[in-house]
Each structure stands twice: as structure tokens, then as C-alpha cells.
Image (cartoon, rainbow, N blue to C red):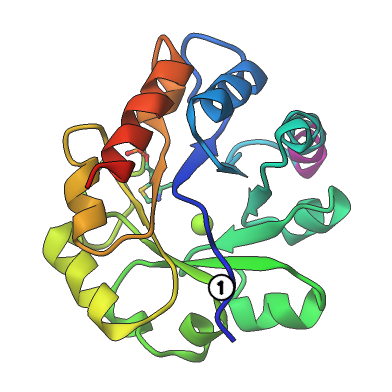
């Protein structure tokens, strides 16, 4: 059954991506501006550090009833009772995650190349990440660049909620939504902004624009 996924603006945050404010402040200010789901993506932290950051972030998010997704660490996700987990092609396969976390609410899976279509992994995901829509200096080990045509192609092949990621900003946000994404995920457009609230507000306006 299709999962309810009402989210539109997805902040993917790490402490090191936040250039002007502490990451907890960035998260809070971004939520005030219109972010409605947050993923903690800590590639260089130990499990213990990751868990500590996740707990602190969850405290902030809980005040606003905003769900927390943990990137690629099942142990941390379960320990902090996150809303869900997000994995990519080279991470723990979604089918295994389902076996290990029976009451998991939300499983995100990144589509990074054409081979993943209609695989068991694809089918078990609650939402799909389109990764990356545009090439980005934030993540350079990507396989292809989907572009707007890729977003349209994936949209026409599935009813699952689609979260677009990769160099999304106020200039291209509306086009990505028009191409069929349900939700936009950003790192630098918010984490590197002097004012995360304003940055989130501007993106949200582009998303809501008719
Ligand atoms: N996955 C695909 S692209 C990306 C991730 C985590 C990074 C997106 O960062 P930015 O700064 O929004 O381009
Ligand atoms: Mg990964």
C-alpha cells in the first residue's frame, strides 16, 4: 500500500555542511521557514557521535512535529526511534532493513541508476530519492545526472512519492516540481545560507507556486 508522504521540503543536514550557524539552529530556523522533514546525514561520525547528534536533533524536531530520517545507519535510527531511514544503492538493501526493523514507518531509497527500476529494493521503499537531479559539489561520487527528463521518466514509471536531490535551489526548484517530484531535498541551499529561515521560505514559495 502507498504510504502517506505529505512532505514538500526536505532538509538533509550534517554538522559540517552548516557554515554560519550550529546545525541545531539551522534545523530549527529552516523548519520555521517551511522545512517539513529532516534527514541527518553524518558520513564521518562514529556511531556514538551520530547517535548523540541524532538525539539532540530529534529533540528540536519533536517540538515542531517534524519527522527525523537517519541516513544509512540502522542502529542509530532504531536507537533514537527515528521516523525512518534513508539508504542508497551501496548501503544496506531495503529488503534487509524491513526484516530487521518490523515496525519501520518510512524507508527511503535513492535511485542512482537505471538498473534499480522495479527491483525488489525499489518496490519495498516508501519513497524514492532521485539522486542526483543535477550534479553537485556536495556529493561527487554520483553515477548519473537525471536532469528534468530523468525526473519525468521516473514519474511516469511509479506512483511512489519522489524526493528530488542534487543542486536544487530557488532557480530550478519549480521546474523540478513541475517535472513530477513531490518533494525537494537540499543540503547547501539551506545549510550554507546566512539565513536558513529565509532560504527555506524562498524554496517553499517556489514549491507552492502554481
Ligand atoms: N545525494 C544525492 S545529491 C546529494 C545527496 C546527499 C547532495 C545534495 O546536496 P546539495 O548541496 O543540495 O546539492
Ligand atoms: Mg549512502
Q: Looking at the rendering, in which quadrant would you find the N terminus?
A: bottom right
Q: Which residue is drawn at 80% across and 40% down?
A: 51
> Looking at the picture, does residue 206 appear above or below residue 158?
above
Callout 1 crowding tier (Cα within 10 Å): few <14, some 14–19, many ≥20: many
Q: Does the magenta stretch include residue 48?
A: yes
Residue numbers of the magenta segment: 47-52
Residue in the image at 22% along x and 52% along y: 176
Residue 15 image offset from top left, x and y in percent: 59, 25
Relative height, residue 198 to residue 160 (above, below):
above
Total label count? 1
Q: Most extreme residue toward the front, as rendered?
A: 210
Please tell me whether residue 4 belongs to the stretch shown in magenta. Answer: no
In the image, residue 18 above or below residue 203: above
Q: What element carries label 1?
A: loop
Residue 59 appears in which quarter of the rendering? Answer: top right
Could you tell me what secondary structure mostly forms the magenta stretch?
helix
Q: Is residue 3 left or right of residue 60?
A: left
Closer to the camera in the image, 60 or 140 = 60
Work out whether residue 39 or residue 159 is closer to the camera in this orientation and state it.
159
Specify the farthest residue to the right: 79
Indicate the position of residue 164 as horizontal and vertical percent values: 34, 55
Q: Residue 132 lies in what quarter of the image? A: bottom left
Q: Is residue 198 left or right of residue 175?
A: right
Q: Nearer the viewer, residue 144 or 125?
A: 125
Q: Examine the rendering and report whether any part of residue 16 can be seen.
A: no
Do we see residue 205 in this rendering? Answer: yes
| Residue 65 horizontal/vertical position (percent) | 72, 41
| Residue 23 x/y as whole percent | 61, 21
Q: Where is mark 1, residue-wise?
A: 126
Q: Which residue is drawn at 16% across and 49% down?
A: 175
Amino acid at each position: 500500500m502507498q504510504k502517506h508522504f505529505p512532505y514538500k521540503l526536505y532538509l538533509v543536514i550534517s554538522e559540517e555542511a552548516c557554515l554560519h550557524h550550529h546545525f541545531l539552529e539551522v534545523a530549527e530556523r529552516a523548519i520555521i521557514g517551511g522545512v517539513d522533514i529532516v534527514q541527518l546525514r553524518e558520513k564521518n561520525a562514529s556511531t556514538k557521535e551520530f547517535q548523540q547528534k541524532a538525539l539532540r536533533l530529534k529533540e528540536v524536531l519533536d517540538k515542531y512535529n517534524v519527522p527525523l530520517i537517519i541516513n544509512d545507519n540502522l542502529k542509530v535510527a532504531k536507537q533514537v526511534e527515528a521516523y525512518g531511514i534513508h539508504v542508497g544503492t551501496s548501503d544496506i538493501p531495503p529488503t534487509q532493513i524491513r526484516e530487521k526493523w518490523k515496525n519501520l514507518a518510512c524507508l527511503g531509497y535513492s535511485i542512482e541508476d537505471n538498473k534499480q527500476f522495479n527491483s525488489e529494493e525499489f518496490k519495498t521503499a516508501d519513497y524514492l530519492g532521485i539522486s542526483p537531479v543535477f550534479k553537485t559539489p556536495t556529493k561527487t561520487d554520483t553515477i548519473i545526472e537525471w536532469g528534468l527528463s530523468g525526473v519525468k521518466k521516473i514519474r511516469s514509471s511509479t506512483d511512489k512519492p519522489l524526493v528530488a536531490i542534487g543542486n536544487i535551489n530557488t532557480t530550478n526548484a519549480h521546474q523540478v516540481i513541475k517535472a513530477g517530484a513531490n518533494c525537494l531535498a537540499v543540503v547547501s541551499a539551506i545549510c550554507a545560507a546566512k539565513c536558513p529561515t529565509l532560504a527555506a521560505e524562498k524554496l517553499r514559495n517556489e514549491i507552492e507556486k502554481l
